[in-house]
Image (cartoon, helix red, strand yellow):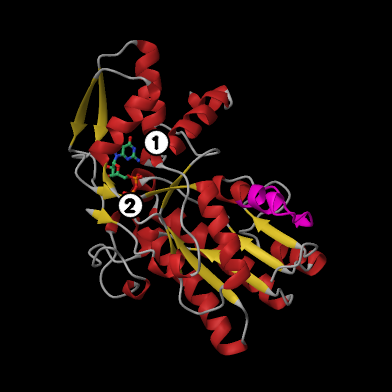
Amino acid sequence: MMEKNAKIYVAGHRGMVGSAICRALGRMGYANLVTRTHEELDLCRQDQVEAFFAQEQPDYVFLAAAKVGGILANRDAPADFLYDNLILELNVIHGAWQNHCRKLLFLGSSCIYPRLAPQPIREESLLTSALEETNEAYALAKISGLKYCAYLREQYGADFISAMPTNLYGPGDNYHPTHSHVLPALIRRFHEAKEAGAGEVVCWGTGSPLREFMYVDDLAEACLLLMQVYSGKETVNLGTGEELSIRELTELVAKVVGYEGEIRWDPSKPDGTPRKLLDVGKLESLGYHHTTKLEEGIRRTYQDFLAGPIRARR
Ligand code: GDP
């Protein structure tokens, strides 16, 4: 059990996932949190990370820092995605281990399972066949982080665990027009189309891929639960177990935003993996079931978008 006064480092606390973890910790009465902004601590710099861990010696670490992006960002900058993620992960996990951190939770991603893994995807599918090529670099880095945690457990008995979140969305998301993930991209595009009175919006690919989406505050609660009750070398899928097509998603986002024009598809943009649904049996057996329905979560995210800084919407 994580004691209420334990010292907890949340790496990536300004990101969508890290900030949700901080909110969840706050709700549960954990007040001894350690955070650093990117300006204060560059997680890609080994010397800085070593000095930070030696000074702070956190009891628990949530590793929610990563370089993330949507399908085009990943496809266009594979070298950056591999380098930044790999070096950041190794620095943080190693620093935590060297400084006797009691437990660390590393976050992978459902996109690191094989492209054609049997659906719904079970944890055992990892590394059983080829990766989706649009995010291979990111996947290789995340698989290495996950394995490093498992190897530290195997070789030294470190209680370092990993979890595999599905596609996430929620407050604090990145609404960049081309480099974000699909859900925030659609919120922005439909909102701008509504404001401009546009009769048509173009979405990427064919609309036929199937995706699962989890609201980030639900994810954060699941992360806290794992930190409290799970110790094992296998990863744990974090998702809802529910999926819909990208076409259905566009209709839902259009409804929430109040856009009433046409939706057209641009098949010159990549579809990515055809289906990505997690088997959440293991998570549910640990006692967690998501609570936020997709439409409600999109509504809250749209409110966040509307309240956010103007520059995020330019
Ligand atoms: P993925 O789950 O790793 O494939 O990442 P994304 O969230 O970027 O994309 C999910 C699916 O949504 C893909 O099939 C995209 O082609 C499709 N999609 C449709 N419109 C958009 C858009 O405006 N932005 C993004 N990122 N994806 C879009």
Please provide percent x and percent y for residue 101: 71, 73
Please provide percent x and percent y for residue 18: 60, 51
Q: So how many labels did they put on this image?
A: 2
Q: Which residue is mark 2?
A: 242
Which residues are drawn in magenta?
Answer: 21-37
Ligand 1, by image quadrant, is top left
Q: What's the mark number on residue 50?
A: none
Q: Which residue is mark 1?
A: 295
Q: Amino acid at mark 1?
A: Glu
* In this rendering, position of residue 155 left or right of residue 46: left
72 falls in the magenta region = no
Q: Answer above or below: position of 46 versus 243.
A: below
Please provide percent x and percent y for residue 208: 19, 44
* Disc 1/disc 2 C-alpha distance (Å): 13 Å
Q: Quadrant of the N terminus?
A: bottom right
Please provide percent x and percent y for residue 221: 57, 55
- State the residue at coordinates (28%, 75%): 128
- State the residue at coordinates (49%, 66%): 163
* SS state under label 2: loop
Q: Answer above or below: position of 111 versus 158.
A: above
Q: Amino acid at mark 2?
A: Glu
* In this rendering, position of residue 111 left or right of residue 160: left
